[in-house]
Amino acid sequence: MTQELRINNNKFIDQTTRLSFKFNGEKLYGYKGDTLASALLANNIHLVGRSFKYHRPRGIMTCGSEEPNAIVQIGNDPSLTDPNVRATEIELYEGLEAFSQNCWPNVKFDIGGINNLLSPLLPAGFYYKTFMWPASFWEKYEFFIRHSAGLGKSPTKPDPDIYDHKHYHCDVLVVGGGISGIMAAKLSAENNKDTLLLDDKNTLGGTTIYQNNDCFKIDDNHTNYWLEKEIKNIKNIKNLTIKTRTSLAAYHGYNYLLAKENITDHLSPDERKDKIRQRLWKIRAKKVIIATGSIERPLIFNNNDRPGIMLSSAIKKFIDFYGVKTGREISLFTNNDSVYETAISLKKSGVNIISIIDIRDKSSSKIVEEVEKHNIKIYWNHTIVNTEGYRRISFIEIMKLSDDGSGVIGKKIKLKTDCLGISGGWTPMVHLFTQSGGKLKFRSDDNVFLPDKNKTPSDQISIGSCNGDFDIKDIILNSNKDVKTFLGIENSSFDNLKVESSKEKMKRNIWLLPSDKPIGKTKPFLDFQNDSTAKDVKLALREGFKSIEHVKRYTTTGMGTDQGKLSNMHALGIIAETTGTNMGELGTTTFRPPYTPLTFGAIVGRNVGEFFDHTRKTAMHNWHVQNKAKFENVGQWKRAWYYPKNGETMFEAVQRESKAARESVGILDASTLGKIDIQGTDASEFLNRVYTNAWSKLAIGKCRYGLMLNEDGMVYDDGVTTRLGENHYIMTTTTGGAANVLTKLEDYLQTEWPELDVYLTTVTDHFSTISICGPNSKKILSKVIPDLDLSDEKFPHMSFKNSIINRIKCRVMRISFTGEHSYEINIQSNYAKNVWELCMDAGKNYNITPYGTETMHLLRAEKGFIITGQDTDGTMTPSDLQMDWIIGKKKFDFIGKRSLYRSDTIRDDRKQLVGLLTDDPNEILEEGAQIVEKLNQKPVEMLGHVTSSYFSPNLNKSIALAVMKSGKKLKGKKFFVPMENKNINVTVTDTVFFDKENKRLNA
Amino acid sequence: MFIINCPYCGERDQTEFSSGGEAHIVRPKQPTELSDDEWAEFLFMRKNIKGIQFERWNHSHGCRKWFNVVRDTSNDKIHAVYKMGEKPPINK
């Protein structure tokens, strides 16, 4: 069985390989080389979707990435389905399944089509105007809007495909493999430049590759013949890399470009298995040559959106490249010479051309004469005033234009046609150029925005039709000349080409073509995807919108997935005309990346799942896992959170762990704390400057708690620093703050105090830290390190000893974050798990209990110790934390000192840290809960909030820390913590709840 | 995304660096002698100009060195890179 609308075209379509596919459930077939669009057209299917707002039937309109209508859903697998795919770009494969979007129950009968009848009620800004009031109705409106908004369906399950990233460096990047791109790539590569040529199609050659017309010749051959030869030649050049199916998405500064390579999207599901689906190329090019071509403009007239109305250049490509007749009785409508090329192609393939309607008076070019020879009726100075046909165009109505083109005159002629090709001239694709920072200039002869040579960022040029050359002669001459200059080449093989061309540049431009009906009764569509018409733009202007950016958003013109590639110029034209502005002054809307939509998969590449972020694990991690620890994430670290036993809840486990640590002994993996090794003759002076307290007099072998501020006086980090030697310290930081503290310290060392002899090294990962705390901790340590004298005289609180465990050197600090007698063993990480197990063994008879971060937080809260980042939030001074004792007032200076007596930091109504007790000791406050004094006040005054809250098993009551306005003065006062369904009575207390005299440190 | 010529490592991608704001703001040697306003000037006031800007950058994912960069914020063109403590090669 042959396809009636298919002509034999062996060059690009392999008619020996039949591919079956389904469209809306209907089984169809096409050939290898087809796109979904060409295969549908070969099956005489034009109607592929419904428009966004009015649900009007829409057909395939273009044959490229600018397609506004033919966007389909591919597949229905919940993890693989792909919405908003342009049928004109997706290559046909065996088993492809596609569905129309935005229609229910189906594309032929869509209930939403009623919006079309209601369209007079749905003007520009309809949603803004209608859903404003009453405000209480918003939730109802939202339901309706959400259900009618959006195109296509997102996949609901994770994407199983693999994506890849590739970093690439080259001398010259050529974007676009049309005739000028191929010339540029050849010149560049032949002159010893490492060259990369990209094209988004599966074959090189652009539109010239199927330009088989007597009117266009290079060296006496048809242009396609010449180009084929060139393509064959460049494939053998060594330093030229060619990538097809690769579309340039973004052009950033410093010639950094992103391109998406489609690797398997054109293969059948079986062939895709285990292959990378798409690859994102991250390209740094020394020089960039943009040869992205141009796209044809539509014409704006009444009912210009019916299925069967297509760009004339698309009809030409479908017949010349894909061998598909888009209709049996085709008419063409134009303001320039391009459609005459299409007419010749159609005639050659035996398609009946009903008529050509040309809004110009005449054209005397050779190509028009050629068409006239075929006895095709040309209606000069005529326009289409209306079209008919709901699911497919069936008739056009034409009338003569008045002298100034603003109206129509004479008798209406009705012509039967099943496909209409339209051409309103050409628009250079300047997207990449402007993305890179280039500025456009306006050429009023043919109303195009072009790259301004004087405002082009360095190391790039635009050539070919994206640079405004639309005639083959200009393209070849200028591309050759510009590339030679750009790359510093003297002689080129293209210097003496003989080029014949026969198009006239003359065109007549009417942005909005007149109809015999008043504009209010017509539907001249500008943005086909978003259903905005010329009427809407005019309405927006009447309502006072002036900036093109505002008109765009108000009318949604150019805001679809096609980003207005077709419609923007007409919107600009109509705005300029209506407001009497020069188009060049009006400018364009901003072109933002990506040029065509990118998949999220390509953007994230391999950085998914466990590769999304690093996971840091301590040396004892596996022990925690084996002992059923639950983990919490602290930055990138996995920290043991609590160790539930026999089905304990988190609350139960934490209560047990907290009691054990105070009654006998607990053990904590504290390895994640940041550790910075500080050495140098000025180390003491350095610490003096970065911490609030004094360090010069700290004896060797002693430890001290330090508080670090920002220059604004706010608490930044804290931790214990130990003096290991005369010029040697080890600083600990919070787990989350480690990297930032090091960066900040380096900053001061390198920029403010370069005279200090100090060296900083991070040793967080090198040493692991085991913390043993509780009344029996001494007994454990004496078993693990029998040689160490643990007497209070020899090894008092806040001191350090070098020691040896099983011949391995370690550092032992007697410091405490729980208020208990406790030790920290710091040991080289690869021995740490072993030492941890030694400690567990040694503690067997003392019920040694491993505890996690939650218990650590509880124990320190009992003692009123702060956690920076939990009880502080970057707005707390040491004084706010009731920690005035740690400020070295006598010190000349330290980071943040001057800020501690700024007018704002000395206010006594700042939020200050307090303790809170609930009147009901069993009531546990929620962290973050607000504290108020008067319940019936409106608006209620928020005095502060709870920062830490726990049930203390050692005190048998609930305790909390909070920050409150003027908190220092509130001790003993009663407040409320209002919750959703109750008010909790609380009393302000001291921040230390347990062992206020610190007796246990030396117990 | 620009390329920065680290004075210690050479040309590297911007992703390796982090920006440290306006350059040549010297921390006062005797903060205690400053009025609230003078201290606030040092603490808070930073320029954010369209055009040539002198900035501090840190090769945070490289040699960790801080240095100065003269950058045109309107087009990200980098006019000069110089070490901390060195005089700007371009007049401020």
Image (cartoon, coloured by chain):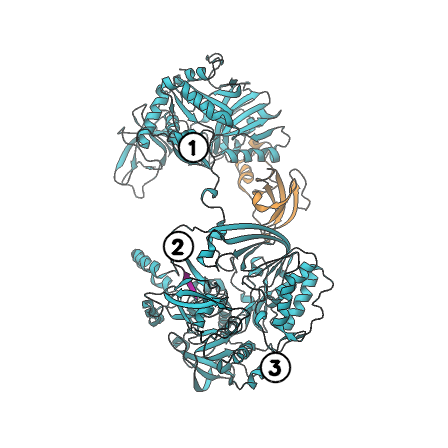
Chain colours: A cyan, B orange
Magenta stretch: residue A73 in it?
Answer: yes
Identify the residue position indicated by label 2 in the image: A155
Residue A23, given in percent of the width and then of the height, sits at 39, 66
Q: Which of the two labelled residues, at mark 2 and mark 1, occupies the earlier sequence position?
A: 2
Check disc 3 and report the residue beneath it: A366
Q: Are marks 3 and 1 on the same chain?
A: yes
Q: Is residue A646 magenta?
A: no
Give the distance between the C-alpha atoms of the residues marked 2 and 1, in whole angstroms.
Answer: 34 Å
Tag 3: amino acid:
Lys
Q: Decide if residue A711 is in sight here.
A: no
Is any atom of residue A222 visible in this view? yes
Residue name at image x 50 percent, y 67 percent: A568
**Which is more N-terminal, label 3 or label 2?**
2
Pick out the residue farthest to the bottom: A411
Per the image, label 1 sits on a secondary structure element best described as strand
Could you tell which of marks 3 and 1 lies nearer the N-terminus? 3
A222 sits left or right of A398 in the view: right
Nearer mark to the viewer, of 2 and 1: 2
What residue is shown with label 1? Answer: A639
| Closest to the observer, A838 or A382 | A838
> Dot 2, how many residues are within 10 Å of its Cα: few (below 14), some (14-19), or many (20+)?
some
- Helix, strand or loop at mark 2: loop
Give the amino acid type for the residue marked by disc 2 in the picture. Answer: Pro
